Image: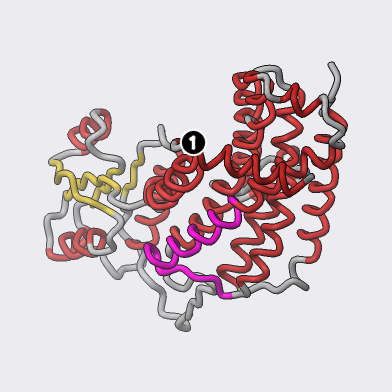
Amino acid sequence: MLRFLLEKEFKRIFRDRFIPRIMFLLPLMQLIILPFAANFEMRNINLSVVDNDKSAASRQMIDKVLSSGYFRLTDVSASYGEALTSVESNASDLILEIPHGFEKNAGQADQPQLLIAANAINGTKGGLGSAYLTSIITPQGSGEAVSSLFLFNPHLNYKYYMVPGIMVFLLTIIGGFLSALNIVSEKEKGTIEQINVTPIPKYVFLLSKLIPFWVVGFILLTLSMLTAWVIYGLSPVGSVLTIYLFAAVYLIAFTGFGLAISSVSSTQQQAMFTAFFFLLIFALLSGLFTPISSMPEWAQRLTLFNPVRYFVEVMRMVYLKGSTLADLSWHIAVIFLFAVSFNTLAVVCYRKKE
């Protein structure tokens, strides 16, 4: 019985020329584009300089700032007011004012004071830009040298942080969004009535809906990992089998979640908006874009009930740290509970008789 239902589902998926493109082509395009667009590294910060000293030391300071790669010189203004006009017109993000006597007073006990003014409309850009600029222009002390070692991401490549999380979000869309449209589409076409009059148990019918998206999710995960390796040179430090094991449980959980939405929805529009609402909340509270530790305490507690959060952490831990199953036992236990809960909810919500 299950075999015939699965045959029906796979034929239904691949007879449609548009659905396979949504499942594979669009997610891979997102994986290629999003890590470049969703980049929180601050580069090319527009800087306006007011050089009141016009000395060799002030020119050397300006060259030092520009050679860091974080700043782009927009203009050298004659006065602070002129530089402020540049900021007000959005041509510049920061102002660096070098005072008179900068070269003459350098190295003395009374160090010359440099002014940094930042456009704080974008608080993140203003704060980080000011911090970058401060660290560059602050003179180094004569104490012991400090050696820094960046663990797990030695080149501080932000794409290495984003790509594993985006791969999780693509699987979430396949498991949660497309499965949410599955049963309700049969309701609109009237084919669900033919299933309801048969003696097929509810759990067998829902299992036939779950397995195809489970298989498609594995194919997409494999293609995503190959894309990450080819485009970004990113491969997991840990075991690939660990990723597949966790993904197997995760896809069961989120496909069950989508089927539960589909079971209680009357139209595809209802299912689409309901799934979109939950997926948006899950994405924002997953740590995909912002660290969970930076969220308010109440939001951090909400993330404990977010299955996406656990898979994002697992992907980053395996990809960057090489974590093993022993390190991820808590994450696996929690996602297993989500799988049981969501699929139980799907079975309970699906009614063969109206």
Taking the image as shown, residue 50 lies to the left or right of residue 3, namely: left
Provide the major secondary structure of the magenta segment.
Answer: helix
- The figure's colour scheme reads secondary structure
Residue at horizontal 37%, vertical 62%? 231
User: Based on the displayed image, in which of its 4 quarters is residue 105 positioned?
Assistant: bottom left
Q: Nearer the viewer, residue 74 or 215?
A: 215
Q: Is residue 235 above or below residue 46?
A: below
What range of the chain is rendered magenta?
A: 216-237
Q: Is residue 224 magenta?
A: yes
At mark 1, the secondary structure is loop
Quadrant of the frame with the C terminus: top right
Taking the image as shown, residue 196 lies to the left or right of residue 18, namely: right
Residue at horizontal 70%, vertical 48%? 211
Q: Nearer the viewer, residue 68 or 104?
A: 68
Image coordinates for residue 200, horizontal then vertical, percent? 84, 36
**Can the viewer see residue 290 in this picture?**
no
User: Based on the displayed image, in which of its 4 quarters is residue 341 positioned?
Assistant: top right
Taking the image as shown, residue 320 lies to the left or right of residue 4, namely: left
Q: Nearer the viewer, residue 164 or 48?
A: 164
Q: Which residue is mark 1?
A: 16
Q: Is residue 107 magenta?
A: no
Image coordinates for residue 270, horizontal then vertical, percent? 65, 19
